[in-house]
Image (cartoon, rainbow, N blue to C red):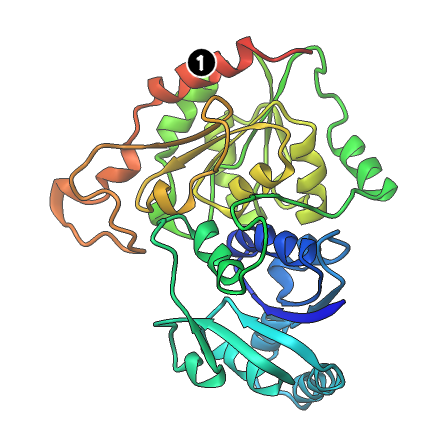
Amino acid sequence: MKKLLLVKLSSLGDIIFNIPLANILQKNGYEITWLVSEKGYDVIKDNPAVKNAVLIPIQRWKKRGFSFKSIFEFIQIALQLRKEKFDIAIDSQGMFKSMQWMLLARADRKLIFEHSREFSTYACNEIVKRSPNPHVIYSYLQFAKYLNLEGTDEIKYTLPPSSDETKAKVDNLLHGLDKSKPMVVICPATTWKMKHWKKDNWKRVVEAIKDKCSLVFTGTERDNDLINYISGGNFINLAGKTQVKELIELFSRAALVMSPDSGSAHLARATEIPAVITIFCCTPPTMYGPLGDPEKYYSIRGKLKCNPCHKRNCPLTGPEAELCRTQPQPEEIINIVNKILQNVKQ
């Protein structure tokens, strides 16, 4: 086996978007060591496409601030990395936080995208052009094309299998769920405010579909107020009660997952089981939308001239500010949900 180092530390969505690349590399005879931060570690550890997952605890180091303990941990990981001699190292992050690991890695060939940020190209010796296809998955697959590998148009997701412990935990979390109806999971929040669809839109969707399905909400603890408003304090609220492992199992049991452009949406798509509706406000679905069967995977956005701006903060002011968060109209989503639920076999 040829040894390959893949450096993609975060975010959860981007890590998931790199999994098809990892599968192609593995299929072509590469044994992959993947450096990943806390956000995506549970997606990469025990993933069938990856030989070794090495945790880079970025969040823990940030929380501590300057610490000799963090320095010691960094050195330990660096020494572990230096023991390996890789045939190829790929930096698909393209930032300073990945550059330092590329500098430490022992590999004859070090690949990175052209125009990568924060001087990260200086740690590599081969520059790869991005794909003309705007979707980020095809951009990452460009590394495989550059290496002249076979099957570079295949998009295959793999995720770690759920343990018995994880399955039991999800069973407990879903205690009381009405299993006579299809389960619909709503993940209404993400880290970007401008990606958030208006809460009243979500509320109208819930009111329209609540009698046709069993609703479950997910998020972090800080999303509880939003979820309580949308749900009216009803249904199953798992905010703050799930990690990535539980979400994989939960989504695998769902008929439909609805979310803004978020790690949850991309994780649901990667399970390849539920239908997925991703609502796009400020970001482009051509880059981040779920690929696959258009009757199963939906990317829905409004039709404003400014959309998508791909900005964290709205550049407009007055009555035009943040209008993208009001679109699409709830009725468009309701119609799609009804169509999906009509075809669900219980």
Q: Which residue is mark 1?
A: 208
Residue 263 percent coordinates (x, y) = 53, 47
Residue 345 drawn at (x, y percent): 65, 11
Choose top left, top right, bottom left or bottom right for residue 115: bottom left
* Percent position of residue 103, x then y: 56, 86
Q: Amino acid at mark 1?
A: Ala
Q: Residues within 10 Å of mark 1 (few under 14, many from 20)?
A: some
| Viewport quadrant of the C terminus | top right
In the rendered image, is residue 243 in sight?
Answer: no
Task: Please state if 198 lies on the left or on the right of 168 as rendered.
Answer: left
Q: Residue at x 38, y 61 (%)?
A: 130
Q: Which residue appears at 70% of the width and 28% of the height?
A: 253
Locate residue 239, reporting x and y percent.
Answer: 60, 41
Of the pair 70 and 27, the residue shown nearer to us:
27
Please determine whether, in this image, residue 269 is positioned above or below residue 254: below
Residue 314 visible in image: yes
Which residue in the rendered view is the most extreme toward the bottom? 68
Answer left or right for 11 relative to 69.
Answer: left
Q: Is residue 25 left or right of residue 258?
A: right
**Is residue 107 shown above or below 202?**
below
Quadrant in which the N terminus appears: bottom right
Q: Is residue 214 above or below residue 298?
A: above
Extreme-right residue of the structure: 164
Along the line of sight, which residue is nearer the eye, 229 or 105? 105
Q: Residue at point 51% right, 80% down?
A: 99
Q: Secondary structure at mark 1?
A: helix
